[in-house]
Image (cartoon, rainbow, N blue to C red):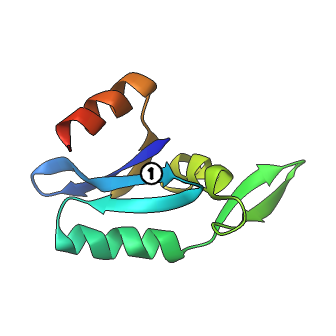
Amino acid sequence: MTCEILVTTAEGQRVAGWLRLKGGRVVASPKTPADGILLRGILAEPTAVLKGGRMVQISLSREPEAWLKALPYMYTGSYLRAGMLSAEEESKLSLATK
């Protein structure tokens, strides 16, 4: 399971990196060292989802899969976006980053 992190710059939107679920942990794969700082900041932030009409905080350490799935709902702004990759996109990414 992989979530792609996109940022908007003066030149347009670009991929900053990926957050992947590996072995029950979320692992960051930044494109640049500066993007690594951004991804570490995202990893440090609490994530919340709407459950039963109220916001519930999800713990990265206790519920890494749910935390990762919630990112696209948390990061939908004009500067910073998150999106889950399809199985096909994830397969292509794995081949490209080997």
Q: Is residue 91 above or below residue 94?
A: above
Give x and y (percent) for residue 90: 37, 33
Residue extending furthest toward the left: 11
Residue at screen point 42% across, 75% down: 41
Quadrant for the C terminus in the image: top left
Residue type beneath disc 1:
Arg
Give x and y (percent) for residue 97: 20, 44
Mark 1: which secondary structure? strand
Q: As rendered, which of 46 and 1 lies closer to the eye?
A: 1
Q: Is residue 98 left or right of residue 21?
A: left
Give x and y (percent) for residue 57: 75, 66
Residue at screen point 29% across, 38% down: 94
Q: Is residue 42 left or right of residue 71?
A: left
Q: Quadrant of residue 85?
A: top left
| Disc 1: which residue | 20
One can see residue 78 in this view: no
Count every numbered label the image shows and give the total: 1
Q: As rendered, which of 89 and 77 lies closer to the eye?
A: 89
Residue extending furthest toward the right: 52
Residue at screen point 50% across, 41% down: 1
One can see residue 25 in this view: yes
Q: As rendered, which of 87 and 70 lies closer to the eye?
A: 87
Residue at screen point 35% across, 52% down: 18
Q: Quadrant of residue 40?
A: bottom left
Label 1: few (<14), some (14–19) or many (≥20) C-alpha neighbours in 10 Å = many
Give x and y (percent) for residue 13: 21, 47
Q: Is residue 35 left or right of residue 90?
A: left
